[in-house]
Image (cartoon, grey):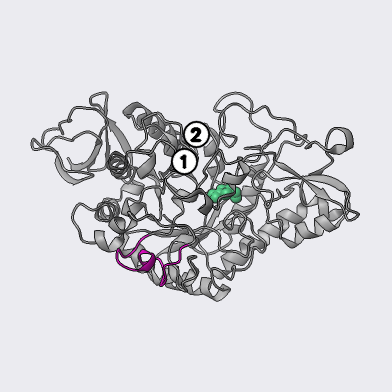
Amino acid sequence: MYQIYPRSFADSDGDGIGDLPGITARLDHLVELGADAVWLSPFYPSPQADAGYDVADYRGVDPIFGRLEDIDKLLTQAHSRGLRVIVDLVPNHTSSAHPWFVEALASTPGSAARQRYIFRDGRGAGGDKPPNSWQSVFGGPAWTRVTDADGAPGQWYLHLFDAGQPDLNWDHPEIRAEFGDILRFWLDRGVDGFRVDVAHGLVKQADLADWHYPDEPVSGEPVEGPRPPMWDQDGVHDIYRDWRSILDKYPGDRVLVAEAWVQPAERLAAYVRPDEMHQAFNFEYLEAAWTAPAQYAVIDRSLAATDAVGAPTTWVLSNHDVLRHASRLGLPVGTIRPRGIGADDPQPDAALGLRRARAATLMMLALPGSAYLYQGEELGLPEHTTMADDARQDPTWVRSGQTERGRDGCRVPIPWEADAPSYGFGPTDSSWLPQPAVWAEYALDRQRDVPGSTYELYRTALRLRRDLALGTGRLSWVDGPEDVLAFRNGELLVVTNFGAEPAALPEGAEPIHASAALDPDGRVPTDVTVWARV
Ligand code: NOJ
């Protein structure tokens, strides 16, 4: 599954923002790469307070991305190439520009229009304190106070993300009915499914009890101890059972994929029980340290948890919300994942990061289950870690009081041609986030058919993954030295060396693919993954 972030994939009209016709024109790239399916991040009408995850109209296309016909063309063209397409569904919150929220603001406390969202009176004298202690994932309080028609300060509304993303009240039957209709609208248009944004957030604990945050980032889920009242409430599962029953009425395979930052793996697996969603992003895998014991533990635990409910496991290393793995893995092992990097922060080791990223990817693509790739990782793209702060657009930067750089560094428009304007992203030099000068060396045309390039590493891996049916295979661990992780998937042996010393392959193992050259004695060097036939 290849994630396209429409703003940054390909710009057909030269306004510096990627668009749907740009994607359609580049679909052959995905076929050449060897992807089976595409997930499109939001393209709906939106004020873009959170890059489109603030939806004002769930049934349209924002003019910056094109028109509804452009989606139809994209679907037709993708399907004719054998590519499936899933779209992003954002049910936890709407945009503050959504007609429902506009109506709620124009209505009085307790009115029907306000019941669709989570409005409460404030605490303290004059109600001037937020109703509870909840914090926005982007920083600052999760509540914003509204001003009444007479100009007086009024109630507060809940937004777990930006103030432009008011949370919906999922206890309200009208919300449930509306989202059922939205699903049908897109299924009727021919989409193959949905990636469900913040799938663990829709239902809140009824009393909206205060929550005392641990020191970790507010979106972090404690593995033990009480569950936060805003995340992973049992009530979310009824919603996904309803949606599953809608999808099951459609011909062909249609899927629901949960974006749920939920731990431990057993709780995440509850989202993919037989009558709920089909897959859930495995963020515990993305966050695991680059050591053999940590990788072994997370892979083993993930497989066991999804096996228990009969669902495929998923694997993901990068997306539009996290530091690109070519940079993340260039930070000292054990670093807590930073939420963005700026020019004055410690910089990742780019060469080490890429070497480890290639090894990590090659290990991931041999695992049974579904692998999710994020646009540009097939080029080995690093995070833009020195972006000028005044170019940043992620609300995290402002809401955190400029303490967290946020996610712009992984969202920079991707390079296609080294010597073209905007590196071939579009017909002009314009790019909504600045592209670093190093983009030229990562451009697709510098890597295509170049032996050893990251692009060719991915292509070969995806071809073999398909030929050897690795995605539907079974993993069995192979004993070896402490710093070396080895497993078999069918006839393939996969060896990753995390240690300082080269690791020998078993007698008779015939290497067929590797993330970097083996040493002269045919051993696996540090931070290298090898695929071998046994
Ligand atoms: C998760 C999305 O991936 C992220 O980009 C967005 O900011 C939040 N959900 C809120 O919709």
Quick one: SS at disc 2? helix
Looking at the image, residue 420 sits to the left or right of residue 204; the answer is left
Image coordinates for residue 196, horizontal then vertical, percent:
57, 51
Mark 2 or 1: in front is 1
Quick one: SS at disc 1? loop
Image coordinates for residue 532, horizontal then vertical, percent:
19, 42
Residue where numbered disc 2 is placed: 265
The quarter of the displayed image where residue 36 is located: bottom left
Q: Mark 2 to mark 1: distance in Å?
A: 8 Å
Is 305 situated above or below 41? above
Do the numbered discs 2 and 1 sit on residues whose CB atoms are within 8 Å? yes
The amino acid sitting under disc 2 is Ala
Residue where numbered disc 1 is placed: 282
The amino acid sitting under disc 1 is Asn
Specify whether residue 301 is in view. Answer: yes
Specify whether residue 198 is in view. Answer: no
Magenta-highlighted stretch: main secondary structure? Answer: loop
Is 399 situated above or below 336? below
Image coordinates for residue 401, horizontal then vertical, percent:
61, 40
At a point 52% along the width and 33% down the height, the residue shown is: 266
